[in-house]
Structure formats: C-alpha cells, structure tokens
Amino acid sequence: MSNVPESRPIAGKTSRPWVGVLLAFFISGSAHFLAGNKRAGIVWFAVIAFFKFLAIGALGSSLIPGILPGIVLVVIAFALWLSMLVKSCQPVPRLRLFGWVIFMCVAAVLEISLSTGARFFFHPYSQPTGSMEPTIQGKHRKSDGTTTGGDHFFVEEYAYWLKKPARGDVIVYKNPDNFPSLAAGRLYIKRVAGIPGDILSIHEGHLYNHGQPVTHPATLANLVIMNPPSPTPQYLADSNSVFEVPAGQYFILGDNTLNSLDSRFVGTISETNILGKVSKIYWPLSRAGQVQ
C-alpha cells in the first residue's frame, strides 16, 4: 500500500489527527476518504475487506487443508489494518452531531453486511453434547466442577447449492416442526447414513444397505450402531428392521450411537432442513452458534 498517495490538504475546519484514527477504526479508509483522497480510502477499504474474506474462506473451506493458511491471512489482514490506522492520523473535516450519527449508521451497516456476507458461506458453531464423539467432542465436566471440551467447527453453508448430501457427510440441520420430541428450529449435527432410495438395516451393530454391508465411506463402514435401552428406537430397532429412505429425505446417525437422538428415533430429515456440511474443526476464534 506504500504507492497510495497521502491525503491532500483540506480546507475548512478540521478535527485533530486522532479523530481520523477513530473514524478509520470503525470504517477502514474513512480518514483518507474524508480528508479528500477518496481513491486511497476506497483502496484501503477494499484491500482489507478482501483479505478478511480470504482469511475466513481459508479457515472454513474443506478445499484448503488445516487452518495455518487462514491464520497467516488473518495476520496479514490485521497488519494491513494497523498500517491503515497509522496512516489515518491526519486532519479530517470536523463532523457535526448529525455527521457522526450518519457515520456510525454507515459503520453499523457495513459491519453487519460484511459479517452476514461471510457467514452466508462459512458459519462457526460449537458442540456442547457428546452425540458425535469421538469425531467431534462435546463439553465435559471435570471432577473439580470446571467444564472442558466442546469442539468448534465451520459449516460450509454453500456445500449443497449445486450437489446433494452424500453418505458419510457430517451435516448441520434445523429440527423440523414435526419432531415433537425435539425443540422445533433448534440446530443439530449428525452424519448422513442413508440417502433417498437406500434400504437400510442393522446386523450385529453394522449398517447394511440393500442387504449388503456398507464398506464406503470408511466412517460408516466402521460405525458401531448400538441402540440405547431407552428410549426405544422407532426405526431400525433390531436386526429384523428394514427402512427405505423416502425421496428428498435423509437418514442421519450420531457417531456416538449410544448417546444420539437421531433418525432411529425421530425419522428422516428433509433436504430443505439441511443448512450445510461440516468442514473443519478448530479452536475458537470468534463467537459461534451452538448445535446439539
């Protein structure tokens, strides 16, 4: 950004230079823009926003392994933001009360728009329960009374825009209104065990499809399905049970089958209730929603 020209002197009443830093804290590049160098202000805003989105994409996308690339991009975005703040220490036009109100409204709209735009593609969640253990750890209470665990993970909310959920995918979905035993609208996380047309059964704790043992993906092939003694499963309750997954529906299971209220008890879920696919587990970097 060193080739961006500095702001030109401005006429009229101006505020002290620290006010420019304050303005830029809320809207990147605003001090340059208001000081008369609109091009520099727009460039600062666009570049910092670009690296923020790039960092979120690298952290949340399953196409980029690990979270180190995302962390590097976060550091770059932060360094650019600090550099912009330093260069924003310059006189800016004095704002009246109405001007400050307008500025803060614009800042709020931009912040909400950027945050909503990012979460439209990637959304962070946390897992408080143990229904997906050991794949995703829930919270656990230690003997001293403190709580530990509760993995955080990203969900690719665009994952099923152009394709259907596949067997083995770990998904987040909204509980349908017709499941009276669960809170309507609450978010849950489970693994897709059956897609439309599958004919499922359980033999000796393993999943079968069309009478043949499931061998792919490995997560389903190795899944040990154990029905808890209570409550009583309504579907695939024993080795004689067979269930055909209806069109537009998905049969889901928790990896911890002894502690998971899933399709064995509440039936299948509709494709329209699926929010997205779990992509990466990470340590908490921001506030996350909770799934059960």
Image (tube, rainbow, N blue to C red):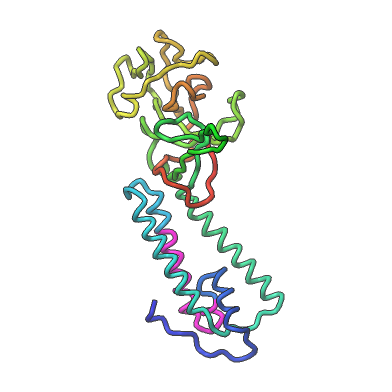
Q: Where is residue 134 in the image (x, y as percent from the top left)?
A: 40, 31
Can residue 90 be seen here? The reply is yes
* Residue 197 horizontal side relative to residue 291, left or right: left
Q: Above or below — where is 124 with respect to 97?
A: above
Q: Which residue is located at x 55 percent, y 32 percent?
A: 175
Splitting the image into 4 quarters, where does residue 11 fall? bottom right
Residue shown at 44% from the left, 43% from the top: 153
> Please, which residue is most extreme toward the left here?
215
The percent coordinates of residue 140 (x first, y second) are 51, 33
Q: How many marks?
A: 0
Please tell me whether residue 47 belongs to the stretch shown in magenta: yes
Magenta residues, as a range? 31-54
Residue, x 45% and y 49% (percent of image)?
A: 122
Q: Is residue 34 magenta?
A: yes
As drawn, which residue projects farthest toward the top? 240
> Which residue corresponds to the image point at 39% horizontal and 43% vertical from the top-left?
279
Q: In the picture, which quadrant includes the N terminus? A: bottom left
- Residue 246 vertical position relative to residue 156 in the rendered view, above or below: above
Closer to the camera in the image, 215 or 127: 127
Q: Where in the figure is residue 120, as x and y percent of width and height?
A: 49, 50
User: Height in image: 127 above or below 212?
Assistant: below
The answer to whether residue 272 of the structure is visible from this angle is no
Farthest residue, direction front: 144
Above/below status of 11 relative to 3 = below
Residue 268 placement, left or right of 206 = right
Is the magenta region chiefly helix, strand or loop? helix
Location of residue 150 in the rendering, given as x and y in whole percent from the top left corner: 49, 38
Q: In which quarter of the image is residue 223?
A: top left
